[in-house]
Image (cartoon, grey):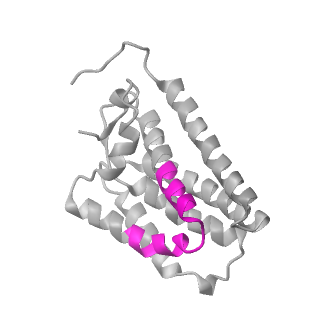
Amino acid sequence: MGADVAELTFSDQYWRMFTNLFMHVSFTHLAMNMLALWSIGPILEQRIPCLAFVGIYFFSGLVGSLSSDIATINQNVISCGASGAILGIITALLAYCLVFKTNIQEMPVKAMLVSLVLTAGLGLLPSIDNMAHIGGACAGFVLGGAVSLCIKMFKYPSKLSLLIIGLVFIVTALGIYVQYMHYALPSGYYVYY
């Protein structure tokens, strides 16, 4: 129904890496993710371009999904949820703070800690996809740092800063594509359940 299962994803159902970001196993799962996003999302959204925020969110989610698929390629694991994307937003805010050397009193440290504890704490429970969390967090930190450097060096909203931010996302998309194709099952190979 759209959840991420490595064997299905790598057998030409690549769209599962994206659709699983909108699926949750319970109302509690959805509520925890939305609470974490609500506490951090608006803070980063005010500091970077809107499309860069959306790009960091979705690419962090995609990298998290791909990381999970690679880690569980020989297992029958069903993965869904937006935790990887949300951790990407949290770590992107951390990267922004490092690039701009933001005074710690200016940032909502409590909100960041609550979001990290909620998301990482859930990772301690059985059946939680920690590889999606790790992949999303790493992608968010790298993308957030790259976007923040572009904003700082090229004085957003200049055309050059927007061009370079666009190139960052194009390179990220190509990287995801290359990794997906590396693990893709041979053409004509399908998994049936």
Question: Looking at the picture, how far across and down is residue 141, in whole percent?
Answer: 60, 58
Question: Looking at the picture, how far across and down is residue 136, in whole percent?
Answer: 50, 52
Question: Looking at the picture, how far across and down is residue 97, in whole percent?
Answer: 65, 72
Furthest residue to the top?
A: 188
Compare residues 19 and 70 and report the one nearer the observer. Answer: 19
Name the quarter where the C terminus is drawn: top left
Please state if 48 lies on the left or on the right of 126 as rendered: right
Res 158 → quadrant:
bottom right
Residue visible at 67% across and 64% down in the picture: 148
Residue 122 is covered by the magenta coloring? no
Is the residue 159 above or below the residue 115 in the image?
above
Residue visible at 45% across and 36% down in the picture: 71
Is the residue 129 above or below the residue 141 in the image?
above
Furthest residue to the right?
A: 153
Compare residues 53 and 108 and report the one nearer the observer. Answer: 53
Please state if 155 lies on the left or on the right of 78 as rendered: right
- Which is the main secondary structure of the residues drawn in magenta? helix
Residue 49 is covered by the magenta coloring? yes
Residue visible at 36% across and 57% down in the picture: 124
Compare residues 119 and 192 and report the one nearer the observer. Answer: 192
Res 121 → quadrant:
bottom left
Question: Looking at the picture, how far across and down is residue 43, in whole percent?
Answer: 52, 75
Name the quarter where the N terminus is drawn: top left
State the extent of the magenta-drawn residues as a range. 36-60
Is the residue 13 above or below the residue 20 in the image?
above
Furthest residue to the bottom?
A: 105
Residue visible at 45% across and 52% down in the picture: 133
Please state if 173 lies on the left or on the right of 189 as rendered: right
How many labels were placed on the picture?
Answer: 0
